[in-house]
Amino acid sequence: MIFKNTGKTQLLTRYNLNKSNQLSPSGFTLAELLVALVITGIVISLTGSGLYALMKANYRSQIETADRLELERSLAFMTDEIKMSQQVVTTIPATITGFSPASGSSQVQPILVLNPALNSGLKKPIVYYLADPPNSSVWLGPRVIYRWGPTLLQNGNYSDGNGHDLTLLPLGSPVAYYNEVVVDRISNLVAAQASIGCESSYNYAVPSLVTRLGFYACIAPDGKAVKLWIYKLPNSSSKSQSVNALVVTRSN
């Protein structure tokens, strides 16, 4: 038997609809959306700034590491050649002819003059000098360290310029000398920034102690011991770098 109660059914239906409407969410207001957008923008901005700062610091660290490695390789090359030499002096002997600095360079200052070992096959010294780079050069100033000397073979011996080992050639064979850049961005004035000191008996290379350049050498009276110091200026993305070493000649 079916009972019909239409009025009561309609009442219950309206009650359930009203209850359902009360429980359902009403959504976000415009003000709430604007606040959420502002907060999201701030978070994204802070995250982006932090990421940029991290990337910039990483880039700066890479540049500084590259500068440091460049200086250390340059110093290692010089120290190895000093060890191969017979004696180190600060001036080019007047009896030696043929020294010619790099084309276009100026303000040439010899810092190291290496007298070669007797068994090297060389008759002329090897010169490390400071100079201003040419205006059209890719090398950065204010100063550049140049090396004037013969090329080296993989076995450590000097070449005549045509790939021949000088120790295997007749004594007095012609040798080609070249100007090569060792390292650039060297300071032209580094007063009171030396990180090493030299004994009072040492001979100082140009310039004097008061106004040391970014590359100088202190040489013992017998020319057998050398203290080197190199100072590389910073660029826009790195800090300055310096290296130093004490080297003793080992050849006769």
Image (tube, rainbow, N blue to C red):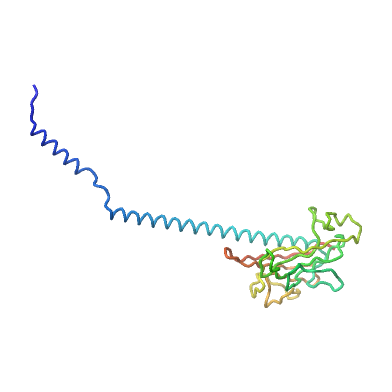
Q: Quadrant of the N terminus?
A: top left
Q: In the image, 116: left or right of 212?
A: right
At a point 67% along the width and 72% down the height, the residue shown is 188
Considering every residue shown, the one lying at the far front of the view is 136
**Residue 120, placed above or below residue 213:** above
Quadrant in the picture for residue 97: bottom right
Residue 135 location in percent, x, y? 69, 69
Question: Compared to 4, does 90 lie above or below?
Answer: below
| Left or right for 185, reference 126 | left
To which quarter of the image does residue 191 belong? bottom right
Q: Is residue 119 left or right of residue 240?
A: right
Whole-percent x and y of residue 198?
71, 72
Q: Nearer the viewer, residue 147 or 211?
A: 147
Residue 17 picture location, percent across and down: 17, 39
- Of 128 and 5, nearer the camera is 5
- Residue 242 located left or right of residue 204: left
Q: x and y percent of residue 231 in the render?
A: 66, 68
What residue appears at the point 31 percent right and 55 percent down from the top-left corner? 34
